[in-house]
């Protein structure tokens, strides 16, 4: 492999690369050509240098050098595996949240289910 200049994370062919779990990286790199894959590999080695991720990237690079073609798919597609959810936090609403919790029976003298001595 040639020495690639290390791209900035915004220049990578995979959006949100830093947040992708290994399984998502393994799937998404299949649509990259060798040049794009080498960019990702240079970035990974210069930053997190996660052994399992480097192994996946090196293996795919070898497959491409041996004649494999990039698969279909859009490497820039939305990444649901890293979406943070709606702004403001929880998706729970009054219609979807559970019932109000009652205090435990021990310690509430007004609870008729509480055993009396």
Image (spheres, rainbow, N blue to C red):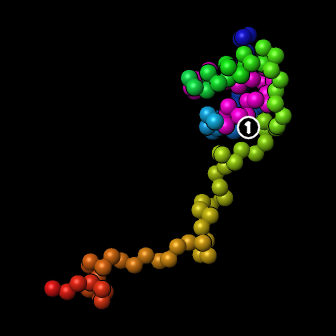
Q: How many marks?
A: 1
Q: Quadrant of the N terminus?
A: top right
* Residue located beneath label 1 in the image: 15
Name the one closer to the observer, 67 or 77: 67
Name the one closer to the observer, 25 or 68: 68
The main secondary structure of the magenta stretch is helix
Percent coordinates x, y for residue 63 in the rendering: 74, 18
Query: From this viewpoint, is residue 77 visible?
Result: yes
Percent coordinates x, y for residue 40 in the rendering: 71, 25
| Residue 14 left/right relative to 18 | right
SS at circle 1 = loop
Q: In which image quadrant can residue 21 be found?
A: top right
* Residue depicted at 50% across the width and 77% down the height: 99
Residue 33 is one of the magenta-drawn residues: yes
In the displayed structure, 87 sits above or below 38; it is below
Q: Quadrant of the C terminus?
A: bottom left
Percent coordinates x, y for residue 32 in the rendering: 79, 27
Residue 31 is one of the magenta-drawn residues: yes
Q: In which image quadrant can residue 115 be found?
A: bottom left
* Residue depicted at 73% across the width and 30% down the height: 29
In the displayed structure, 67 sits above or below 78; it is above
Q: Residue furthest top?
A: 2
In the displayed structure, 37 sits above or below 19; it is above
Q: Residues within 10 Å of mark 1 (few under 14, many from 20)?
A: some
* Residue depicted at 65% across the width and 55% down the height: 85
Query: From this viewpoint, is residue 39 visible?
Result: no
In the displayed structure, 39 sits above or below 93; it is above
Q: Which residues are the magenta region? A: 24-50
């Amino acid at each position: 492999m040639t020495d690639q200049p290390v791209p900035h994370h915004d220049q990578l062919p995979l959006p949100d690369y830093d947040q992708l779990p290994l399984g998502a990286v393994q799937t998404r790199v299949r649509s990259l050509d060798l040049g794009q894959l080498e960019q990702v590999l240079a970035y990974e080695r210069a930053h997190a240098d996660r052994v399992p991720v480097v192994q996946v990237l090196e293996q795919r690079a070898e497959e491409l050098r041996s004649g494999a073609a990039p698969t279909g798919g859009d490497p820039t597609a939305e990444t649901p595996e890293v979406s943070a959810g709606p702004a403001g936090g929880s998706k729970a609403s009054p219609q979807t949240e559970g019932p109000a919790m009652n205090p435990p029976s021990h310690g509430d003298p007004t609870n008729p289910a509480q055993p009396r001595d």
